[in-house]
């Protein structure tokens, strides 16, 4: 049983160590909004979201006040819009009208973001999928709160390289058309391999087709809590180190479990999962890179970094999974460059490169996240980076992702200011050798042999 004593125990974590519930995400199925008439689809979507989510923000604030636990974001995820709009949308512009409806509904209920402007194309693209992907630049330009994602690969199906090529071109276009905005549209788009159906974190949240009509998913985060705990066992052996991380992850996840249960009860919506990820922020002391340094590295990126991150990720999962009825989503350690001051410092000091980050993604929760690259990087190069990351996920049977930010008009060493939880990112060098012929082959990279287990 969860009791208030467990919450009281976390007071120092909240006040001094940046513990927070990063998000309460209300997942909403839009499958019953499908219609062949576009106006009717938009009406159905708006009405369903504003009805089911009308009390989400107020409920989050009430829980915050009752338990003195910061809940940073209240969010919504919806069924991938390529599925919802396929019958009505005959052009990319038609899909953009749905993006605007999502944005309008999100603003009406007061949430921070709405995710699910998405397509699932790991084995092939329908016409609707292709139209939605091509619409993303305009959708990101004309909305404020809409987040987008595309799943282009899986361990069971391989990697859809036609989609990877198209997305490389789309990312370049998105960067260009949104370059004048405070936040680049690329910061609200992520490409996945093995995307989970129940991820509460943006920009990749969508409501999977296997989920209930509505669900509450909660994401917790406490890099600062873990770092503080490790400071107390500095110099101890790996056994002590691992036990400390597990115990800390257990306590952090119990907070998320309490918040999820309370939100579920107050909203009358079933509890889905706790995502127990260590998601950093630009705040000093809220850094995954700092945890790696506390484990024994001079800087993130030094020899031993991948091993330290693997240890951290595994112990977080082992500790957290015992603290909640249902653990899901991504659950582990995030390594977004722009959102983690320790990562930014490591890049600026020359300790951390794109290639080392790619190696680290073999053992982290997601992948190449919030990485600024030169604005003149070719679309095929972006596609090649995505393909590499998707291959890591496909072969290792794990979720991987890319959120790349081509910084238009900027080059290596410049800084991209994004703001808020998204922080700022130093522009990182990209390998300039060409992969054009590889990306332009088209077709699909087959699934690995170990995927055939049926």
Image (tube, rainbow, N blue to C red):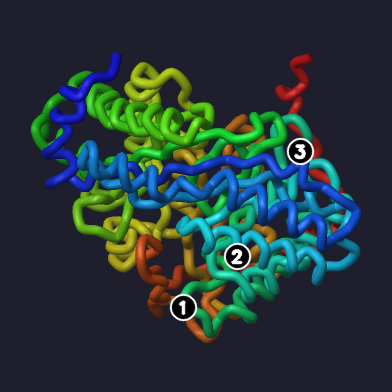
Q: Earlier in the sequence, mark 2 or mark 1?
A: 2
Q: Earlier in the sequence, mark 1 or mark 3?
A: 3
Residue located at (82% from left, 57% from top)? 40
Q: Nearer the viewer, residue 223 or 298?
A: 223
Name the spot of residue 144 as percent of width and height, x first. Answer: 54, 69
Q: Which residue position holds label 1?
A: 182
Residue located at (51% from left, 47% from top)? 367
Q: Nearer the viewer, residue 440 or 123?
A: 123
> Closer to the camera: disc 3 or disc 2?
2
Q: Is residue 411 left or right of residue 1?
A: right
Name the spot of residue 131 as percent of width and height, x first. Answer: 83, 62
Q: Nearer the viewer, residue 128 or 287?
A: 128
Whether residue 401 is visible to the viewer of this picture, yes or no, is no
Whether residue 273 is visible to the viewer of this picture, yes or no, is yes
Q: Which quadrant does the C terminus fall into? A: top right
Name the spot of residue 39 as percent of width and height, x first. Answer: 82, 63
In this picture, is 32 found above or below 352? above
Q: Secondary structure at mark 1?
A: loop
In this picture, is 355 found above or below 70? below
Q: Secondary structure at mark 2?
A: helix
CA distance separating discs 1 and 3: 36 Å
Q: Which residue position holds label 2?
A: 104
Q: Nearer the viewer, residue 369 or 428?
A: 369
Q: Earlier in the sequence, mark 3 or mark 2?
A: 2
> Closer to the camera: disc 2 or disc 1?
2
Dot 1, crowdedness within 10 Å: few (<14), some or many (≥20)?
few
Q: Which residue position holds label 3?
A: 158
């Amino acid at each position: 049983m969860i009791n208030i004593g467990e919450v009281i125990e976390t007071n120092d974590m909240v006040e001094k160590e940046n513990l927070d519930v990063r998000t309460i995400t209300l997942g909403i199925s839009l499958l019953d909004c499908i219609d062949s008439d576009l106006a009717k689809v938009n009406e159905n979507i708006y009405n369903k979201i504003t009805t089911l989510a009308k009390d989400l923000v107020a409920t989050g604030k009430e829980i915050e006040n009752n338990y003195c636990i910061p809940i940073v974001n209240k969010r919504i995820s919806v069924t991938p819009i390529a599925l919802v709009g396929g019958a009505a949308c005959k052009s990319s512009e038609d899909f953009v009208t749905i993006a605007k409806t999502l944005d309008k509904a999100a603003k009406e209920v007061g949430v921070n973001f709405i995710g699910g402007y998405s397509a699932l194309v790991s084995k092939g693209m329908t016409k609707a999928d292709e139209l939605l992907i091509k619409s993303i630049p305009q959708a990101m330009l004309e909305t404020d709160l809409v987040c987008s994602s595309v799943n282009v690969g899986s361990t069971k199906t391989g990697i859809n390289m036609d989609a990877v090529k198209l997305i490389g071109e789309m990312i370049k276009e998105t960067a260009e058309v949104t370059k004048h905005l405070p936040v680049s549209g690329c910061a609200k788009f992520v490409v996945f391999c093995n995307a989970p159906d129940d991820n509460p974190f943006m920009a990749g949240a969508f409501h999977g087709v296997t989920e209930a009509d509505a669900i509450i998913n909660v994401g917790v985060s406490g890099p600062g809590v873990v770092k503080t705990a490790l400071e107390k066992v500095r110099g101890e052996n790996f056994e002590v180190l691992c036990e400390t991380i597990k115990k800390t992850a257990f306590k952090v996840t119990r907070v998320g479990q309490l918040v999820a249960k309370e939100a579920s009860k107050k909203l009358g919506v079933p509890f889905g999962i706790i995502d127990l990820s260590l998601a950093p922020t630009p705040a000093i002391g809220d850094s995954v890179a700092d945890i790696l340094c506390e484990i024994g590295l001079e800087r993130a990126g030094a020899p031993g970094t991948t091993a330290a991150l693997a240890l951290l990720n595994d112990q977080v999962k082992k500790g957290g999974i015992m603290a909640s009825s249902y653990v899901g989503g991504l659950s582990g350690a995030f390594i977004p460059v722009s959102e983690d001051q320790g990562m930014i410092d490591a890049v600026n000091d020359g300790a951390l490169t794109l290639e080392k980050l790619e190696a680290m993604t073999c053992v982290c929760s997601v992948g190449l996240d919030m990485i600024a690259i030169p604005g003149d990087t070719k679309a095929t190069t972006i596609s090649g980076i995505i393909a590499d990351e998707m291959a890591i996920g496909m072969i290792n049977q794990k979720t991987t992702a890319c959120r790349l930010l081509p910084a238009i008009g900027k080059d290596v060493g410049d800084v991209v200011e994004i703001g808020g939880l998204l922080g700022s990112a130093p522009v990182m060098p990209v390998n300039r050798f060409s992969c054009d012929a590889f990306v332009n082959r088209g077709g699909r990279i087959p699934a690995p042999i170990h995927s055939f287990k049926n």
